[in-house]
């Protein structure tokens, strides 16, 4: 989730697919020219192309790490919100008791729940205090 959020929210693009395609086209043309000059050079160009692709893949990973660093605070805020809404990765009503809210609001708490919640609605709903 963090990687997806970092990619979409970063101030720069982390996707280098266009550059990888350009590199492939460049090395394909270079391999063709080298093979025409000397067929034994084809392997050398292939090795260079493979090293370049690996270098581009490493660069893409570094860009993703930079995006995560840039988005660290918003991602931490998102994690805190998720932890409050889903404590321990589960549903809040499985961890907390309704009694603190009931003692605060009294029987009106149940009236509010009946007004706000629809048992047939499968979406999550957040009720404020």
Image (spheres, rainbow, N blue to C red):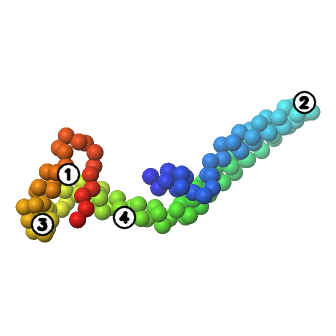
Q: Nearer the viewer, mark 4 or mark 3?
A: 3
Residue 29 in percent (x, y) is at 83, 34
In the rendered structure, are the residues bearing label 3 and label 2 in contact, judged by CB atoms less than 8 Å apart? Answer: no
Q: Residue at x 54, y 55 (%)?
A: 9
- The quadrant in which residue 121 appears is top left
The answer to which of marks 4 and 3 sits earlier in the sequence is: 4
Q: Nearer the viewer, residue 50 or 80?
A: 80
Residue 99 in view (yes/no): no
The answer to which of marks 3 and 1 sits earlier in the sequence is: 3
Residue 14 in percent (x, y) is at 61, 52
Q: Residue at x 29, y 59 (%)?
A: 85
Q: Secondary structure at mark 3?
A: helix
- The residue that mark 4 highlights is 80
Q: Is residue 36 left or right of residue 59?
A: right
Residue 35 in percent (x, y) is at 86, 32
Q: Nearer the viewer, mark 4 or mark 1?
A: 1
Q: Is residue 33 above or below residue 73?
A: above
Location of the C terminus (image quadrant): bottom left
Spatial CA span between label 3 and label 1: 15 Å
Circle 1: is it few (<14), some (14-19), or many (20+) Cα within 10 Å? few
- The residue that mark 1 highlights is 116
- The residue that mark 2 highlights is 36
Spatial CA span between label 2 and label 4: 61 Å
- The quadrant in which residue 123 appears is top left
Q: Is residue 54 left or right of residue 108?
A: right
Circle 3: is it few (<14), some (14-19), or many (20+) Cα within 10 Å? few
Spatial CA span between label 2 and label 1: 75 Å
Residue 97 in view (yes/no): yes
The answer to which of marks 4 and 1 sits earlier in the sequence is: 4
- Residue 105 image label: 3
Q: Secondary structure at mark 2?
A: helix
- The quadrant in which residue 84 appears is bottom left
């Amino acid at each position: 989730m963090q990687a997806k959020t970092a990619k979409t929210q970063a101030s720069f693009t982390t996707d280098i697919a266009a550059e990888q395609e350009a590199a492939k086209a460049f090395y394909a043309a270079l391999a063709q020219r080298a093979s025409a000059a000397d067929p034994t050079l084809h392997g050398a160009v292939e090795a260079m192309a493979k090293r370049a692709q690996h270098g581009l893949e490493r660069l893409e990973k570094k860009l993703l790490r930079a995006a995560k660093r840039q988005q660290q605070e918003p991602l931490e805020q998102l994690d805190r919100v998720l932890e409050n809404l889903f404590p321990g990765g589960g549903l809040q009503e499985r961890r907390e008791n309704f009694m603190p809210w009931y003692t605060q609001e009294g029987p009106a708490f149940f009236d509010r729940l009946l007004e706000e919640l629809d048992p047939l609605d499968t979406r999550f709903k957040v009720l404020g205090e």
